[in-house]
Amino acid sequence: MTDSLTARLGRARGWLGAILVLALPVPTAAEIAFDAPLIIVMNERAFVGGADAGLIGGIIGNASNDAAEAQMAEFAARTPGVDWASLASEEFACFAVADEQAGCRTVMVLDSYGNVDELLADSTVQHAIVVELVQTFRTSIRYRARVVVHELSRGRKQFGEDRVFTALYETILPRPLWDTSVEEADQWWAEGVPSRLEADARRSLRELRELAEFVEPLTEDKWSLPKEWKQLPKIGTLEQAGRARCSGLPCGDVRILEQRGDRTWLVNDKPLLPAYGPSVASLDGNALINETNLFYLISVPY
């Protein structure tokens, strides 16, 4: 007898360890049905270019993944004892749920994007959502988190991607400390209970969900972007005011969506690599001054 998807995922919790699987809704004209799984892959791929990236993109991707692997390990070492998989599951359980009072999704934990097809193959579900979550800490400098959300549907032989969109969150050491010693910078991140790094990472999970829920209804496909984004102020507005820095030709595509407290939401009015789709980012004031080129921050992580 073929096991149910739920039974297989339940056993997989013991095998693996860092993907969250939730029953995600399938939108209809009147309601959202809870019969499609959502899989969160944690800290696996910093570069999600795949076949769309070409040979050069593949080389860059491998280098990015190698660099990010060390930063993922550094983040884990700086936040000992924190179960990020559980925290992420709690936050994303109600992702895109219209009425949370009616209940959220069941969350389960696995650990490899490569197992998605296997997990879904023997199920009866027709749709699925995969959320790739990466959390990195570049020693003494910055915390960065990103989700790439893939919406999948069953084809004749396997699941194919219908839509993809991306959200990024970044916090950087205050500018006055950029030229200080590593020890002083580390002390800044370690201050407080929980530490400043842990508190910001917890906040990032909430904001990543908000960012993803903002861009989800605006996404038609991996190449289409909301026309309204071209009417938003360009990042050059903040550069002229001395509040931002952007380097490289793609800077002309970076737009200011809105200011939210101590953070600024940015969008790119032209597609990044097709593997990322429409993209939105939340940067604190120090991150704005450091770099706002979303092509670099999202497509070519460093």
Image: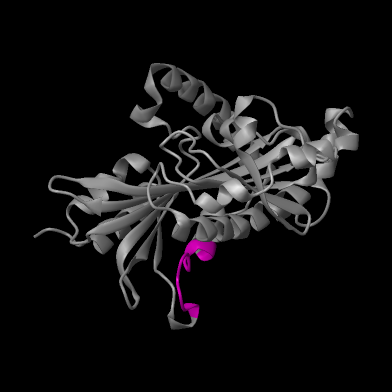
> x and y percent of residue 177 in the render?
88, 35
Q: Is 95 in front, or is 109? A: 95
Q: In this view, does 1 lie to the left or right of 227?
A: left
Q: Tell which residue pokes out farthest to the bottom in this image.
A: 101
Left/right of residue 141 with respect to residue 35 in the rendered view: right
Relative image position of residue 257 (x, y in whole percent): 65, 52
User: Hey, which quadrant is residue 69 in on the image?
Assistant: top right
Residue drawn at 40 percent across, 26 percent down: 53
Residue 138 is inside the magenta segment: no
The quarter of the image holding the N terminus is: bottom left
In this rendering, the answer to whether 5 lies above or below 184 is: below
Query: Looking at the image, which residue is at 47% across and 64% down?
Result: 95
In this view of the protein, which residue sits in the foreground, 92 or 26? 26
Relative placement, left or right, of 243 versus 84 is right
Instruction: Specify the principal SS of the magenta part.
Output: loop
Let me know if residue 188 appears in the view.
yes
**Residue closest to the eye, 79 or 62:** 62
In the rendered image of this protein, does residue 69 appear above or below residue 6? above
Residue 197 is situated, as x and y percent measured from the top left of the image, at 73, 47
Question: Does the segment drawn in magenta span residue 94?
Answer: yes
Residue drawn at (62%, 53%) of the image: 82
In this rendering, the answer to whether 147 lies above or below 49 is: below
Q: Residue at x 40, y 46 (%)?
A: 111
- Magenta stretch? 90-100
Percent across and percent down for residue 219 are: 43, 53
Q: Which residue lies furthest to the left in this view?
A: 1
